[in-house]
Every structure is written in C-alpha cells, then in structure tokens.
Amino acid sequence: MKHTIAVIFLFVLISFLPPSSWAQQKNSTPFNYTINKRVNASKGVVVSAHPLASQAGLLILQKGGNAVDAAIATQLALAVVYPGAGNLGGGGFMVAHLANKKNIALDYRETAPAAASKDMYLDSAGNVQTNLSLDGHLAAGVPGTVAGLFTSMKYAKLPFSTLIESAIRLAERGFAITSSQAKSFNSTKEDFVKFNTSKPAFVKEQHWNEGDTLIQIDLANTLKRIRDLGQKGFYEGETARLIVAEMQKGGGIISYDDLKNYKAKERTAIVFPYKNTTVVTMPLPSSGGIIIQQMLGMIEHRDLTAMKFQTTAAVQLMTEVERRAFADRAEFLGDEDFVKVPVKTLVSKAYLDERMKSFSASRAGKSDSIKGGIIPKESLQTTHLSVIDNNGNAVSVTTTLNNSYGSKTLVSGAGFLLNDEMDDFSVKPGVPNMYGAVGNEANAIAPGKRMLSSMTPTIVLKDDQPFVVAGTPGGTTIPTSVFQTIVNIVDFGLSTDDAVNKPKFHHQWLPDELYIETGFPENVAKELEAMGYKLKHIAAIGRTEVIKVSPAKAGKPKFEGVADNRGDDDAEGW
C-alpha cells in the first residue's frame, strides 16, 4: 500500500512538472525558483516584476524569438504569476526601438464604456463617490491588453501559440507564491470576498504562506481561448459573454459592443535629444512622456554633474521642475483623440525657459502660486518589463490594472481581474484621484475616451543604438522615477544598480509635499525643510526595471539588467 501511494505521488508530481524547456533555464521550475537582482549577458536580457515571467521571456529569446516576442510572453506570464498588476483585464503601453531603427509607440490603454458619462461618479449633490470609481464592477474601463498583444505581433517572429505556452502552463499547473504575494493575498481577502460574485482563486479559508501553490484553471481556459481564437477569443465569444454577464451581475456597464469595438492604436513616439543621448518615450494618453520631456528640458542647460547626486542643490532643482511639469499635467493634458492639447508649446524651449523664471535655488516654490503655464494659441498598481535582444531590438512595456488588483473584481468563469482605470479620469475637475493627481475638463469622462495615464515606458539611445531601457510602476511617481533614472545615469554617472536602487524623491504639484524614500540622506532632508519644503517619508517609490548597454567588445554588446530591490523583481539573461 505504501508503495502504491508513493507511485501515485510520484506520478502526480511528474505530471505537474513543467516541460523540459523550463528545466533548461537557471533557477528552473515554477515550484523552485530564485530571484536574480542583476545579470550580465551578451545575447539578451529580460527584467520584470516576477522571476517566472522573466524566465518565460528569456525562454522565448532562447527559442529564436526577438525582444517583442519575449515582451509578449513576459506580459502573458505576468497575467498569471503577478495578478496584482499583470493582467488580461487592464491595459498598457509599449515603446520599442527596432533593429531597423524604427521607433514604436503602441497604445492599448483602457477606454470608457459607451454607457459612461461625465458625472457618473457624482451623487445627487455633486459629491464624488470615489468608492464607485475604485472598487467593483462600475470602476472598470474596457480592457486593452489582449488587443495590444496581438497588435504588437506584427513585429514578432514566433507564433502566438508558442508565446502563450508558458502562461497557460503556469495557470493550469500552478506555481509557488512568494512571501510578499502570500501577505498581499491575505491582506486583500476581505475585498476579494466583498467585490466578487464568485470565489476568486486568490481566496482560501486558511492563510496563504510562502511556497503555497496557486492554480488558476479558469484563467488557463481563457488563455487557451485566446491561443486558439486570437483576439476574438477575448473580445468576442465565450470570454466576452463571461465579461458581460459579470457586468450584469454587479452593476457594471461594459457591453458586447464595447469589447468588440476596442482597438489598440499605434501612436507616434515622442523622440527628443537630451545631452549626448536621444530619448524615446510614450505620447498621450501617457502624461509621462510629455512630463519627462518637460523636466529634462528644464534642466538640460544646468550643470547637474557639478551639483552631484542627491545634494540639496540637485534635489531642489529637480523637485521644482517636477512641480512645474505636474502643474501643466493637471491643466492641459488629456486624450488627444478628444481634446486639443498644446503639446508643441508645452515642450518648447521658450515655454520651459519661461516656466523656470520663477525658480529660486534658495527657497521652496509654492504650488498655490505656481499653476499651469500660460499657453498662447497654437498654429499605484502597475508593472513594467524591459527586454533587449542581440539584434538591436529593445522593448519597454508598462501595463496596469491601476490600483493593486484593480477593481478587486474577477470575471466569474474567466479567472482574470478587471481594472479600475475609470478613476484615472477627472471624475470632477479639481478633485484628486487615488494618487492625488488632479485634472480638469481635458481629462473628463467621455464614451470611448482613454483616461490619462502616468505610465512611461522609455528607451534612451546613444549613437542611434539602445543605451538604456527603463520603466516602473508607481502611479504618479512613474514619470519622476524614470526622470531620475535617466539623470542618475546620464548626468551623475551612477552605476545601473545605484540608478535603480538608491532612494528616490517625488513632487507632483498637489499635494504640495516632497515625498522622500526610506534611506534618503538625512542632512539633505533637513536642509530642504529649512528651505520651506514639507517632507513626507514613504517606504518605497516604484520598482524600476533597467537594462543598460555597454560598448561592444569583440563585436558583442554587453547587457546589464537590474531588477529593483523593492519587490520580487527579477533579471534574466544569456
């Protein structure tokens, strides 16, 4: 009898082991893996929020796929192993610089459903009901991630069925959760129960512990429909039926037509010079690309290298350009398909010089007096991945559900969470969203409109070749974190490790507070307070994923991948 049990156990164990292709990798199986914070490689690197997702992307590079293939596979795996932000039910942006020198900006941001209206989150007295825009069925915009994946396939090499294989296996056979995931599932249990019409896979009677296995059969079946039917396997047919049924059960407004009519859009990437580099980043509806261009433009002719990293002078200057850029964000930015945004003026040298005339190096600016600029008439949870291959393709992707686990609402029978991106609209002019960002009519809700985003996938080129691939989650802290990462490397000459992991700071105009991260220099903090800054200490800002390319040796570029120490982020390379 004991032998029979042992044989059965062995058979079950073997049946749940991943294919041999997984075992070919370092740190190999979904039930026994480690987290690598940095890697040096010559053929390719993937950096993402979870080691199993990074490994899934690396496997695709090893199979002959390019950086776009690997980015697609990594996103799909993140939808399984990183459910707090990895997703099928959210949206994102992809920025890429291809080997043929073409720059790509792909927008698969969520859209407002056709039944959405400007005042849909206001009560009869005109007060904002933030609970409705943040949690539950009504908070969800029309998901864009799956459409984005298929739109990016035109730049890929391998079949989609190969790219989705790891994600299906991880969902169907399960994987061991990390300590931080166990804590997150446990702390969110009440919300999962409250906002769902059926029991999500993330809920169990006992507490989750590190090493417990998470199996997601419904999600695996949804992934299989996408594999077999393509984009229609999500936006039409059984999955669409399940989404609409979920909406009807919980008072949501996403319809069949909303799903069927969703389209990802190719945009023109923002490309601009900064010192001896060229920055390639995301245009609207990402606010981040414009903000970064503004911030770098305001400091370009100032000698930050002489100021040195994290001195009072450098931090104060960078804080003040952050303040001014976010004031403009609140005043002017929105979806250009719906509103006219004076982009050319906002990033022009004359305008940025004018914005800095009120700057004083000896005292703090005040947000109640520094508003959005004068424009003449013109003629928190997100995840990022960075990928590079040895042919010169670089990909930077940021995707999101908005809040951690989005709306906390799972599509019954489909196994994936819906976003709460409707909160990224200005639900009422001047009223801050969950990240404290304010806006006005330019970012008001309208059917089919894309809500303003802070996601800022970015690639920095040197001599027209990829130099830095970067991005981060973190809500409104995303643009300032990417900004600081670029300055840390280009101006201050920091190592990639320090550029990612040294304490960061953040100012977003309103609230008029300077956020500083744990470990920020105490002497600098005291000097900033003496200048009039109100400081707010926070544990962590973002989780930056960076790949840096060093000069070629013997004809081979050297890639350095660094995953942020602030989470379970992981770097893989070969």
Image (cartoon, helix red, strand yellow):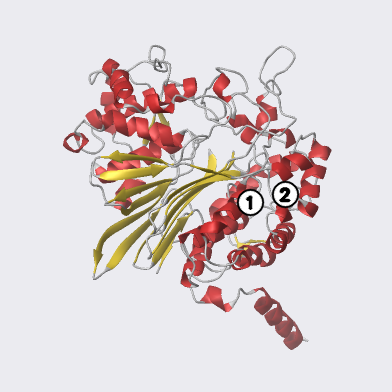
SS class of the residue under badge 2?
Answer: helix
Q: Residue at x 55, y 44 (%)?
A: 92
Q: Position of residue 13 (x, y in %)?
A: 66, 76
Q: Is 262 displayed left or right of 347 in the figure?
A: right
Which mark is drawn over residue 146? Answer: 1
Q: Position of residue 329 (x, y in %)?
A: 46, 25
Q: Quadrant of residue 129?
A: top right
Quadrant placement of the N terminus: bottom right
529 above or below 36? above
Tell me the distance, in whole angstroms, between the alpha carbons under discs 2 and 1: 9 Å
Three-letter code for the amino acid on which mark 2 is drawn: Tyr
Task: Identify residue for label 2.
Answer: 235
SS class of the residue under badge 1?
Answer: helix
Mark 1 burial class by Cα count in 10 Å: few <14, some 14-19, many 20+: many
N-terminal-most mark, 2 or 1: 1
Q: Residue at x 34, y 43 (%)?
A: 279
User: In front here: 16 or 139?
Assistant: 139
Q: Position of residue 455 (x, y in %)?
A: 49, 40
Labels 2 & 1 near each other (Cβ < 8 A): yes
Q: Residue at x 69, y 50 (%)?
A: 416
Q: Residue at x 50, y 62 (%)?
A: 70
13 above or below 466? below
Quadrant placement of the C terminus: bottom left
Mark 2 burial class by Cα count in 10 Å: few <14, some 14-19, many 20+: many
User: In front here: 251 or 444?
Assistant: 444
Q: Is residue 509 visible?
A: no
2 above or below 424? below
Q: Position of residue 295 (x, y in %)?
A: 34, 31
Three-letter code for the amino acid on which mark 1 is drawn: Val
Q: Quadrant of residue 570?
A: bottom left
Q: Residue furthest front?
A: 379
Q: Is 414 displayed left or right of 297 in the figure?
A: right
